[in-house]
Amino acid sequence: MTHSTRAHCTVAAALAIALLSEPASGGQRDSGAARGGDKRPSLALKATPPVGFTPLRVHVVAELRDGPNDYSDFYCPTVEWDWGDGTVSENSEDCDPYEAGRSVIRRRFAADHTYRQADSYRLSFRIKQKSRVLAQVTAAVQVRPGARDDIDN
């Protein structure tokens, strides 16, 4: 892959992430009005690398941006990574009870995943409280056949 192709892939991935980002409220963007006029934090997702060859290990980072540090809906959530290949990872933490003005939301979540089959994948990151999805963002990952895949055929 040439440098210009890599740069194009990075820009394309950033655009795909921006276009695929979707709020949990049925596709409408938050107007900034949430409890007491506080702006709801927005969710962003970056997959590195967005394109590669099998087996492809991808590092993903989801970040909550803007909004108050004590946004109650996002305090102590369950997070779910749906890798788009039939694999889902979920985790939650034990937290102290929420206290307005004192409790702080976690803003950065990271994980790694290895894709072993060539294909186009749509990975999703979700912030949940119990079974209710509060926020979701998606990204595209393109996995191409690697050198070992050609030998086996």
Image (spheres, rainbow, N blue to C red):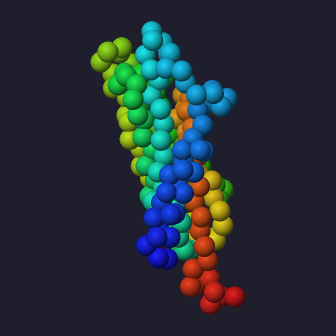
Q: Residue at x 47, y 23 (%)?
A: 40
Q: Is residue 47 above or below residue 56?
A: above
Q: Is residue 36 above or below residue 80?
A: above
Residue found farthest to the front: 4
Direction from residue 39 to residue 120 in the image, left or right? right
132, 95: nearer the viewer: 132
Direction from residue 11 to residue 97 in the image, left or right? left
104, 53: nearer the viewer: 53
Q: Quadrant of residue 94?
A: top left
Residue 16 seen in this snapshot: yes
- Give the image location of residue 90, x and y in percent: 53, 44
Q: Residue at x 53, y 66 (%)?
A: 51
Residue found farthest to the bottom: 151
Q: Is residue 78 above or below residue 118?
A: above
Q: Residue at x 37, y 34 (%)?
A: 106
71, 75: nearer the viewer: 71
Residue 72 seen in this snapshot: no
- Give the image location of residue 120, x and y in percent: 65, 62
- Give the image location of residue 31, x and y in percent: 54, 21
Residue found farthest to the top: 36
Q: Quadrant of residue 109?
A: top left
Count the marks: how many? 0
Quadrant assignment for the C terminus: bottom right
Residue found farthest to the right: 153
